[in-house]
Amino acid sequence: MIEVQDVSLTLDDRPILRDINLTLREKRIAIVGSNGSGKSSFVRLLNGLRLPSSGRVCVDGQDTRTEGRKLRRRVGFVFQNPDNQIVFPIVEEDVAFGLKNLGVPPKERDAKVTAVLERYGLQEMRKQPAHTLSGGQKQLLAIAGVLVMEPEYVVLDEPTTLLDLRNTLRISQAISALEQTAIMVTHDLDLIREFDRVIVFEQGRVFADDVPNAALERYVEAMRDA
Ligand SMILES: Nc1ncnc2c1ncn2[C@@H]1O[C@H](COP(=O)(O)OP(=O)(O)OP(=O)(O)O)[C@@H](O)[C@H]1O
């Protein structure tokens, strides 16, 4: 369970998030809202990539302010831009790197890397330089690199923006199949119809928080009136 308590965030003297109180425990949670409404800033708080200006964020009772390093392992984060995530030159090295850091023995590591590359259709490219992948393939690689670590929570910031329909469906199915809690920022409203909960941000505040149909109806209405 992730608890966000009385959180506000100010950056460069600008209020970005205000008075956020949320308990995240459902398996599939979507974060939607207009450009600049604070979605990316919000999800960065969930594993301590950012710290709140006031209030606190706790993951299973552990505060991101003091336990950030540990929590970043438990809360996997898939960035909007895969270039921010891919650090090693060769595809298989990039996926293996986190496991290597954790001291997973080579044989087990190789089996996990092969399984995740197969799952995301990247097996044929495993020896290829990562920079030669297409944008969508890079996005899949970034997701594979996080999921191979088997984090307890997965946060995804617009994971399908570069993907074609087949790969969007592939990611959507992969997210549905996850055992972990997944928290996903997206503008693709079709992708989240089956989610457990949709939280709509507007101007740094929670504007709606409900099951998909009800939350999205309010969101679409608000955008029509805007
Ligand atoms: N480092 C920063 N310094 C100052 N302002 C920032 C910083 N990062 C983000 N902001 C501002 O915070 C606001 C929210 O940005 P954020 O990226 O969280 O929005 P978003 O809802 O994810 O938008 P989008 O849908 O366009 O990705 C924006 O007005 C942005 O300009």
Image (cartoon, rainbow, N blue to C red):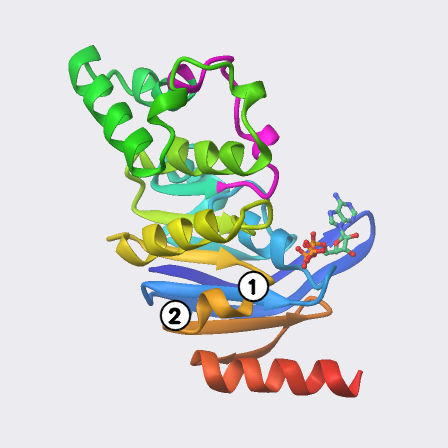
Q: Which mark is residue 163?
A: none
- Residue 91 drawn in magenta: yes
Foreground tag (2 vs 1): 1
- The x and y percentages for residue 188 are 56, 63
Q: Amino acid at mark 2?
A: Phe
Residue of label 1: 188
- The x and y percentages for residue 216 are 55, 80
Asked if one can make out residue 60 in the rendered structure from this viewpoint, the answer is no
Depth check, front residue: 99 or 129: 129
Q: Is residue 59 left or right of residue 213?
A: left
Residue of label 2: 195
Q: Is residue 130 left or right of residue 18?
A: left
Q: Is residue 191 above or below residue 100?
A: below
Tell me which residue sits at (54%, 30%) in the image: 85
- The x and y percentages for residue 139 are 51, 37
Q: Amino acid at mark 1?
A: Asp
- Quarter of the figure that contains the N terminus: bottom left
- Residue 23 drawn in magenta: no
Q: Is mark 1 within 8 Å of ligand 1?
A: no
Considering only order in the chain, which callout, 1 or 2, is on the residue closer to the N terminus? Answer: 1
To which quarter of the image does residue 111 belong?
top left
Q: Does the residue at mark 2 contact the one at mark 1 (Cβ under 8 Å)?
A: no
- Quarter of the figure that contains the C terminus: bottom right
Q: Which residues are magenta?
A: 78-93
Q: Is residue 128 left or right of residue 161?
A: left
Residue extending farthest to the right is 13
- The x and y percentages for residue 168 are 47, 52
Q: How many marks?
A: 2
Q: Residues within 10 Å of mark 1 (few under 14, many from 20)?
A: few
**Callout 1 secondary element:** loop
Q: Residues within 10 Å of mark 2 (few under 14, many from 20)?
A: some
